[in-house]
Image: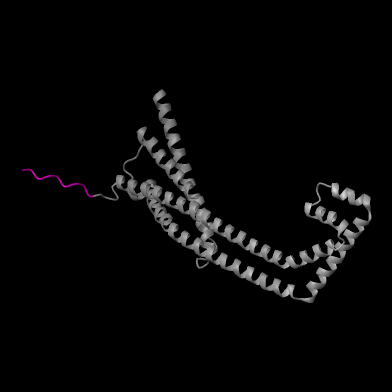
């Protein structure tokens, strides 16, 4: 009675493992098909995205295969294995065939993805350079316009009025000098303007002269930041997706070819026996 119960539980466990494994494999294949739709093979961005997503989900079919093979192993260990089933009708045969195919797919993804990310990085950097060059040209045209000079003069007048108003009020001036949040450069200017009224005009003129260079520096700093970001994203994508693809390819090929060999589908050449002397 006890042996019968063990046999029944083993049969249930084997069947459950096989069913779960098959469901995981089939759902992964369906997921891959859905991810690739709509097909846009000629688009590099589509190729990068589909490669990343397929690699990210690549471990799921492998787990399903492991469950499937474990289920057959449990069935075989319990004496429930039906040896009369032809290889072509054996789920293990199709799983091993799929493993070999996936190994080929993942080994092909590696160089293709590296090439796509490299070209995408080059295009991104070229686009950043064009945008930066366009921004510098626009800045140069803007700096030389009457409108820009008028805005600078208007801003100088506002700041000059604020500084003079502050200097005429001793109480507000002392509060400003004691304010910890006020930049030290402004405090120094307020101290100098007590003895030199022209200090404010000299400061504002100097700031107006330095403004174009400051704007240009800001554009170039932003350009460098975007280039570093593009290089970093490309490196991360190449490293993560590329290495993962290689590992998945190795794993699937080992499963596929080793399994097919054990089933006798792929025959290896054995050593020839030594002739009897």
Q: Is residue 39 visible?
A: no
Q: Is residue 274 magenta?
A: yes
Position above or below: 264 against 149 = above
* Residue 260 image position (x, y, % from top left): 32, 48
Q: Is residue 137 magenta?
A: no
* Residue 95 located left or right of residue 188: left
Q: Is residue 92 visible?
A: yes
What count of labels does the image hold?
0
Position of the C terminus, as image quadrant, is top left
- Hey, which quadrant is residue 144 in on the image? bottom right
* Residue 101 image position (x, y, % from top left): 40, 55
The residue under the point 35% across, 36% down is 76
Q: Main secondary structure of the magenta part?
A: loop
* Residue 115 located left or right of residue 232: left
Write down the region rendered in magenta: 269-277
* Residue 80 image position (x, y, % from top left): 36, 35
* Residue 153 image position (x, y, % from top left): 83, 69
């Amino acid at each position: 009675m006890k042996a019968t119960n063990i046999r029944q539980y083993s049969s249930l466990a084997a069947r459950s493992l096989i069913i779960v494994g098959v469901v995981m494999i089939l759902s992964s294949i369906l997921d891959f098909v859905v991810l690739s739709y709509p097909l846009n093979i000629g688009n590099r961005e589509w190729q990068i995205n589909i490669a990343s997503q397929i690699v990210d989900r690549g471990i799921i079919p492998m787990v399903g295969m492991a469950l499937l093979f474990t289920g057959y192993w449990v069935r075989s260990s319990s004496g429930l294995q039906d040896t009369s089933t032809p290889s072509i009708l054996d789920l293990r045969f199709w799983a091993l065939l799929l493993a070999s195919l996936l190994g080929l797919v993942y080994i092909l993804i590696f160089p293709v993805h590296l090439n796509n990310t490299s070209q995408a990085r080059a295009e991104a950097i070229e686009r950043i350079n064009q945008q930066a060059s366009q921004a510098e040209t626009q800045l140069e045209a803007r700096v030389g316009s009457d409108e820009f000079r008028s805005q600078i003069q208007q801003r100088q007048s506002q700041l000059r009025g604020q500084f003079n108003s502050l200097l005429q009020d001793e109480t507000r001036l002392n509060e400003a000098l004691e304010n910890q949040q006020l930049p030290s450069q402004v405090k120094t200017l307020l101290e100098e303007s007590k003895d030199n009224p022209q200090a404010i005009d000299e400061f504002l003129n100097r700031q107006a002269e330095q403004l174009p260079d400051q704007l240009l520096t800001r554009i170039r700093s932003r350009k460098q930041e975007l280039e570093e970001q593009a290089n970093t994203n490309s490196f991360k994508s190449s490293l993560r997706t590329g290495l993962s693809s290689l590992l998945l390819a190795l794993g699937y090929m080992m499963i596929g070819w080793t399994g097919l060999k054990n089933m006798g589908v792929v025959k290896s050449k054995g050593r020839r026996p030594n002739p009897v002397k």
